[in-house]
């Protein structure tokens, strides 16, 4: 493998020069030299990317890792010549097979794209044209770049669709993007990117929007294809699991600067830079925390055969029933965390929303401290609402943009008749608890970052002194370092208030860190439920096993040499 | 996790390092060129309307048989209500009764702005009530929206003419007649906004916090409809000013003795070939006013409601 950085390319990784490299000199498909891209004046910093240098060799996968705002996507756009006018390249070069794409004319860039360099994106649905058949979209690439006749093009497309392992290529050719699943769409994107056999493939978070089992398949596909074609791949991701899975070399970006570059094992196991160390430390381990859970603690929440069926009533045509949750039996004890783990559409959020009674369950019982709440009218429910609080996934939409943070936190207590002065005092205390300045009370949500907003949401949920806190993918939208901070905060709160916690996540690593018990959901059904230790160490159900097998970087020991 | 690690954690995290300097909506609005231009032009017009008696005008209903059909800039006599004859310079000429067009146009600004602003406010007020009800009370939705669809099926100007014919023309009836056809559009907009906003996690969080429905409506949903409604309001205002002028021009609006731009143009129409100034000056004022309000609305839309800017 081409594990070493080229001599002189990076000064950050001394020692890598001595490594044996199989890469003949000069075979770099992409060489980025001191690339600098400016940000508009008055922004957070002067440059989006400053003096970044790295290279991608033939047949190599280089992972570009960084948190949001690190400039990793901007680099990709710079190479592809897709930068908006507000972000000009002010220095350096990106040499694609020796040709600087940052200075190429629009005409030349059009020739290079798809033919010599191509890109796949995070959202295959928006990257594909919804009103064009998939085959036509692939055909377009061939029409513009080759002189093949129509039957030849069709044969080539079918062959490519076969190569990306799409079932029934002839049907896929005629399908519209919305008729395919997310994974299939991403395969179409990959087919489109590779149909002309480019030298460089840029993959910008290509699996972030996919479920973990689909992600595993797509990662394998990209690795297989690039090995077969000898394509150089620049793989952009924020997920260290994915890095461990696919990378040969890793480049770490922080605020537009390259802080570390080296072979995968070097960077992930023996990181040199403090920032890389911090990031890798923040990656949750995929093994249960091993904390003993008290089996005698009182049960706070219990669901019995909880059902939620959505009925699709059309004016004409048949009624369709969709069972989002079927016969769900769960219980959470005081001071403990129950994790509900599953992929999208598994019904895990439906269960949470039923318990908070944001939606009405269609069957079964929900007992909160022995009181049945599934059937109560919304009026009767009010006194009980304060006992269950929820924190949502999207910190940007969870706070009303037109109300101050103080008003948001005080809302609950004021609803339950707490005097204003006391509510304000409580809000101050809670902000301190979530490690935020009391000055935040007067400010509006847009002045805070995602992690800070999530802290505010936690404070708001705690203001009613609930007995059960539901975290619905509460850390999924956060960068890994921020995620670690919020997880630690939730853990502290759980211990301090002896809270029962229902933790809903798709991320097995996160679940392993916080859960005492785990319920694995698949298509609305709890397929496996038990102590975290047992689920993680001896999964019984085949779906659970498939889920674990798909977890990226599962066998990789981060930060351990 | 050990203490030193924790420390480096907070200090190295990209997020805490980044200072958030996101501008507030208000700052963006103030920097927008279109908003500035529209606001200055509109402020000027409001100034003219407010200071009408002190801008070298005479009573717009005064006439003098001796000063009929004067060209702009000419000087002539005019008789006041007390019977006193004064010399007056007709900046914009006079009409076939010998009335000062400049005075009439300046006073007409009052009517146009009053109609525009009041019609917009009336349409918004009713539209908000109907839209909120339809969006939040699902059982009312079907009935209310079908009524609105019905109103929208009739051309606005026809409804206005019919209503004024039934009530006789006065400032209030004109305003109401112009506002009514606009209500369905506002209701639809508010309803659509309510339907989206009620699914937002912050509304769900409020439900979980035990906030009663009326408070969710007023404290969480309504404030978030303000930006698009302000934008919509400016467009209603511009169209109301135009419709008022059209109604007056057709002779079904305010009585001809009240100086409005439409009335002045209607009276000048017959002599347009010989004395185009009768139509030209009120026409220019009307065009500039509508343009200013529309530009202001466009600027507000771009800054307050980027999503809508893409949609429209």
Image: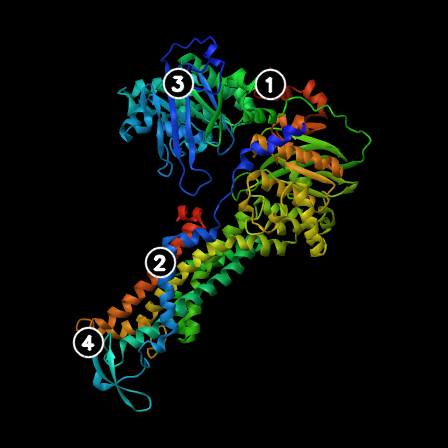
Query: Residue at point 36% right, 22% down?
Result: A117
Residue A10 horizontal/vertical position (percent)? 44, 19
Q: Camera-side residue: B306 or A28? A: A28
Residue contact between numbered discs 1 and 2, judged by CB atoms under 8 Å: no
Identify the chain of the residue marked 3, using the numbered disc in the image. A
Per the rendering, the mark at residue B71 is 4
Residue under label 2, please give it.
Answer: B37
Relative to B217, say whether B83 is above or below: below
Residue under label 3, please give it.
Answer: A160
Marks 1 and 4: which is nearer the front? Answer: 4
Q: Gap between marks 2 and 4, in whole Å?
A: 32 Å
The C terminus of chain A appears in which quarter of the rendering? top right
Identify the chain of the residue marked 4, using the numbered disc in the image. B
Q: Gap between marks 1 and 2, in whole Å?
A: 62 Å
The earlier-in-sequence mark between 2 and 4 is: 2
Residue under label 1, please give it.
Answer: A549
Residue A526 horizontal/vertical position (percent)? 67, 28
SS category of the residue bearing label 3: helix
Marks 1 and 2: which is nearer the front? Answer: 2
The earlier-in-sequence mark between 1 and 3 is: 3
Q: Gap between marks 1 and 4, in whole Å?
A: 91 Å
């Amino acid at each position: 493998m081409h594990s070493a950085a080229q001599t002189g390319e990076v000064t950050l990784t001394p020692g890598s020069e001595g490594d044996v490299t199989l890469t003949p000199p000069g075979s770099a498909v992409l060489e980025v030299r001191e690339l600098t891209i400016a940000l508009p004046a008055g922004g957070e910093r002067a440059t989006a990317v400053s003096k970044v240098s790295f290279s991608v060799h033939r047949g190599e996968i280089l992972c570009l890792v960084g948190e949001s705002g690190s400039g990793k996507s901007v680099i990709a756009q710079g190479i592809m010549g897709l930068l908006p006018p507000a972000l000009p390249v002010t220095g350096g070069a990106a040499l694609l097979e020796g040709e600087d794409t940052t200075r190429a004319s629009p005409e030349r860039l059009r020739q290079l794209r798809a033919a010599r360099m191509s890109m796949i994106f995070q959202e295959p649905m928006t990257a594909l044209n919804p009103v064009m058949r998939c085959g036509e979209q692939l055909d377009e690439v061939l029409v513009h770049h080759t002189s093949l006749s129509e039957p030849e093009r069709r044969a080539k497309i079918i062959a490519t669709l076969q190569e990306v392992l799409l079932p029934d290529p002839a049907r896929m050719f005629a399908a519209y993007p919305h008729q395919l699943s997310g994974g299939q769409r991403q395969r179409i994107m990959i087919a489109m990117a590779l149909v002309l056999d480019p030298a460089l493939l840029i993959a910008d978070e290509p699996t972030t929007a996919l479920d973990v089992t689909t992600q595993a398949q797509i990662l394998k596909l990209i690795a297989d294809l690039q090995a077969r074609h000898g394509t150089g791949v620049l793989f952009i991701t924020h997920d260290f699991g994915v890095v461990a899975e696919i990378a040969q070399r890793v480049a770490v970006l922080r605020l537009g600067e390259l802080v570390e570059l080296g072979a995968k094992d070097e960077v992930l196991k023996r990181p040199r830079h403090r920032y890389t160390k911090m990031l890798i430390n923040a990656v949750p381990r995929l093994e249960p925390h091993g904390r003993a859970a008290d089996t005698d603690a009182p049960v706070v929440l219990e669901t019995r055969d909880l059902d939620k069926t959505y009925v699709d009533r059309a004016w004409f045509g048949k009624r369709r029933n969709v069972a989002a949750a079927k016969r769900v039996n769960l219980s959470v004890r005081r001071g403990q965390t129950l994790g509900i783990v599953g992929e999208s559409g598994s019904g895990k959020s439906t269960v949470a929303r039923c318990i908070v009674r944001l939606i009405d369950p269609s069957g079964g019982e929900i007992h909160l401290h022995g009181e049945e709440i599934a059937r109560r009218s919304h009026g009767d429910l009010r006194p009980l609402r304060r006992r269950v609080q929820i924190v949502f996934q999207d910190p940007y939409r969870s706070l009303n943009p037109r109300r101050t943070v103080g008003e948001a936190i005080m809302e609950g207590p004021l609803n339950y008749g707490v005097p204003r002065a006391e509510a304000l005092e409580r809000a101050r205390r809670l902000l301190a608890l979530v490690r935020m300045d009391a000055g935040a009370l007067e400010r509006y949500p847009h002045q805070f970052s995602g992690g800070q907003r999530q802290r505010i949401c936690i404070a708001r949920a705690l203001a009613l002194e609930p007995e059960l806190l539901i975290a619905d993918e509460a850390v999924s939208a956060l960068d890994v370092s921020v995620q670690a901070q919020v997880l630690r905060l939730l853990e502290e709160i759980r211990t301090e208030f002896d809270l029962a916690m229902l933790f809903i996540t798709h991320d097995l690593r996160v679940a392993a860190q916080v859960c005492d018990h785990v319920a694995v959901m698949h298509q609305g059904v709890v397929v496996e439920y038990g102590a975290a230790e047992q689920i993680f160490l001896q999964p019984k159900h085949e779906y659970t096993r498939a889920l674990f097998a798909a977890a990226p970087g599962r066998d990789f020991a981060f930060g351990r040499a | 996790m050990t203490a030193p690690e924790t420390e480096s954690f907070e200090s190295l995290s990209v997020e805490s390092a980044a200072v958030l300097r996101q501008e507030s909506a208000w700052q963006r609005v103030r920097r927008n060129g279109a908003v500035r231009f529209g606001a200055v032009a509109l402020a000027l017009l409001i100034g003219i309307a407010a200071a009408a008696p002190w801008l070298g005008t005479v009573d717009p209903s005064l006439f003098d048989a001796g000063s009929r059909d004067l060209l702009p800039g000419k000087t002539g006599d005019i008789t006041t209500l007390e019977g006193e004859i004064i010399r007056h310079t007709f900046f914009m000429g006079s009409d076939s009764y010998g009335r000062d067009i400049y005075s009439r146009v300046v006073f007409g600004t009052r009517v146009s702005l009053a109609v525009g602003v009041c019609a917009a406010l009336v349409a918004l007020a009713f539209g908000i009530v109907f839209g909120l009800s339809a969006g939040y009370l699902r059982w009312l939705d079907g009935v209310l929206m079908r009524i609105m669809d019905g109103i929208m099926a009739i051309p606005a100007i026809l409804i206005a003419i019919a209503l004024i014919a039934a009530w006789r023309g006065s400032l209030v009836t004109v305003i109401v007649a112009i506002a009514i056809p606009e209500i369905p559009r506002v209701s639809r907009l508010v309803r659509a906004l309510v339907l989206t906003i009620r699914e937002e996690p912050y509304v769900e969080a409020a439900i979980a916090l035990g906030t009663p429905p009326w408070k969710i409506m007023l404290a969480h949903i309504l404030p978030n409809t303000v930006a698009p409604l302000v934008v919509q309001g400016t467009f209603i205002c511009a169209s109301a000013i135009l419709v008022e002028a059209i109604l007056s021009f057709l002779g079904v609006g305010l009585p001809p003795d009240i100086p409005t731009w439409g009335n002045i143009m209607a009276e000048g129409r017959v002599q347009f070939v010989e004395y185009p100034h009768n139509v030209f000056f009120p026409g220019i004022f009307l065009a500039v006013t509508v343009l200013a309000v529309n530009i202001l609305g466009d600027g507000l839309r771009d800054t307050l409601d980027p999503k809508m800017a893409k949609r429209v």
